[in-house]
Structures are given as structure tokens and as C-alpha cells.
Amino acid sequence: MEKLVEVNQVDVGSLKSEEWYQNLIDDCKTIITERRFNACWEVIQCKWEIGDFKRVKIYGKKIVQGLAESLKVSERDVWYCIQFRKKYPDLNNLPEGKAISWTKIVNEYLPKQKEQSEVIPLPKGKFDIILADCPWRYDFSIDDKDKIEQHYPTMDLEDIKKMELPANDDAVLFLWATAPKLLEALEVMKAWGFEYKSNAIWDKEWIGMGYWFRGQHELLLIGVRGSFSPPESDKRVSSVYREKRTEHSRKPEYFYELIEDMFPTGKYLELFARRRRPKWESYGNEVKQFRD
């Protein structure tokens, strides 16, 4: 007991000066660095395996669609994997060797994908129910595999704000926003002529990345223009909805059904849609991204 007391009385500064302590810290740092390095390299190996273009020659675009659906990634990501395998059939010839990241490979060493998605012009007429999932551009990426541009093309904030929405004088806007993009989303809402009213939360039941908190939710902001009325009292539900996320950027069917139930006679428009939906007009260059 006497020896234990003596150890407990050692101050932190003295502890850190011990040789065994320094060796322990150095070993831990090495392990952490190696794990991060190995994880990045494993991502690159995985992308290389996915990109076996011999399968494309046999199965055509179906293999791209199938892989994207099964792996829950975008067809764009699979396309880059194929270009990667074509350009580097031998991983030993990679520039910078194993120290390179997937993001750097895509941005600096692979050809850019030409837009092959169908571009849908803004529909004619006016709409009173608008749902938007803007392609926000991020200035950072915690992890290569979560880099937004790997999944879909993004837009500058000012370009989004300049869009002229085909909205009625009395209309409601449901606008998706992530926590880092909350202020920008409010800017967009104001630029489009809507006044913020409330928001709902989608708990993804999946913990992502983040600098302050690891993101587990997205916000659905609600704004109105003119004298648009809120839903009837019996249609008002909890502001928190829980459902595990699936493909990147895909939103739960629940929210479409909720909006339709709140406003059953509305004229619906989805901006930056990634699939077509009955009763809704769709705008976006990736309306075929998700399949039922």
C-alpha cells in the first residue's frame, strides 16, 4: 500500500519524462499511423478490385449498376474504379506508391467523367410544394470514401441561390441541410424567397464523421412564402424520425409520404431529385440514380 501511494503522488510532468513512458507513446503513435496508412491503402485496393473492366466487356453497363446498388455507392464511384484499373493494371506502378490517397488519384490522375446522366429542365408551371436536396460543396473531407464529389457533382452556393424556382406566390419549401451547411441552407431559403418556419430531424441511426460531433442526423428545414398554411393538426407529427441510412444521399420514403399526407392536393416538385416519383415533377441530372 505504501508503494502505491508513492506512485500516485508522482506528478504528470515527471511521468512524461520517464523513458518507458516515452517508448509507450512512440509505440502507440506508430500503431495509429500504421492503421491509418493501412486503412487508406485497403480503400485503394478495394477500388482496384471493383474496377476490373473485363467484367464491363462481358456484362456492359449492367455490372456498373449492379455494383453500385449492391455496394451502396454511386455509379460515378464505380466508373472511377474502372478508370483506375484501366490506367493502373499493376498497383506497384502507382505514383507516390502506397502513400497516395484515393481522392488524390481521382482528382489528379484519372480522367474526369463526362456527364452521362439525363438532365431534366425545370418543369413548366408553378408549384406550391417544393422539396430540395441541394448538392452542397464542402471545403473538407474527413475520409476519402465520404468525399461528396465521389458520389455526385456539387454546386457553388451562389449558383444555387441564383436559381429561379417555379414556385407559386403561396408555397412551402422543404430544404434538406446537414449541420455544417445550416447557415448556407438558410441563405438559400431566403434567396429563393421563403421565410424559415421550423425543421425536422432525420436520425440516421448511423454515426458518420465530423470535427465537433460525429454526424448522425440531417435537418429538413421548412420555409414558406405568401400565406401558405401549415398542415391540419391531425397531420402534425414528431419532429424526429429514425431510420437507418442506406445509399449515400438517399432520403427515406417516409418524408415523401409525410409531405403528400400533409398536403394531399398539392402540386409537388423535387429539386435535385435522384429518382422519379409518382405525383411529383423531378428536376436534376441524376434522376435515375436510385432504383426501387
Image (tube, rainbow, N blue to C red):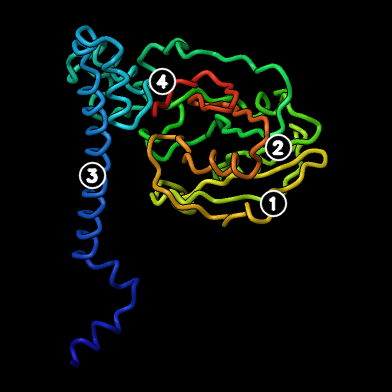
| Circle 4: element type | helix
Q: Quadrant of residue 120?
A: top right
Q: Residues within 10 Å of mark 3 (few under 14, many from 20)?
A: few
Question: Viewer-proximal residue, 32 or 205?
Answer: 205
Query: Residue 259's spot in the image, x, y percent?
Result: 60, 41
| Kind of residue at badge 4 | Asn
Query: Residue 228's spot in the image, x, y percent?
Result: 77, 41
Task: Answer above or below: position of 106 versus 193.
Answer: above
- Which numbered disc, 3 or 4, marks the residue that appears first in the sequence? 3
| Kind of residue at badge 3 | Arg
**Residue shown at the point (36%, 23%) measured from the top left:** 77
Q: Is residue 75 left or right of residue 282?
A: left
The residue that label 3 is drawn on is 35
**Residue shown at the point (55%, 29%) measured from the top left:** 135
The residue that label 1 is drawn on is 232
Q: Which numbered circle lies on residue 189?
A: 2
Give the residue furthest to the top.
57
Q: CA distance from mark 4 to mark 2?
A: 31 Å
Whether pointer 4 and pointer 2 mark residues with C-beta atoms closer than 8 Å, the reply is: no
- Which numbered disc, 4 or 2, marks the residue that appears first in the sequence? 4
Q: CA distance from mark 3 to mark 4?
A: 24 Å
- Which numbered disc, 2 or 3, marks the residue that appears first in the sequence? 3
The residue that label 4 is drawn on is 107
Question: Viewer-proximal residue, 133 or 267?
Answer: 267
Whether pointer 1 and pointer 2 mark residues with C-beta atoms closer than 8 Å, the reply is: no
Question: Which is more foreground, mark 4 or mark 1?
Answer: 1
Query: Residue 54's spot in the image, x, y percent?
Result: 19, 10
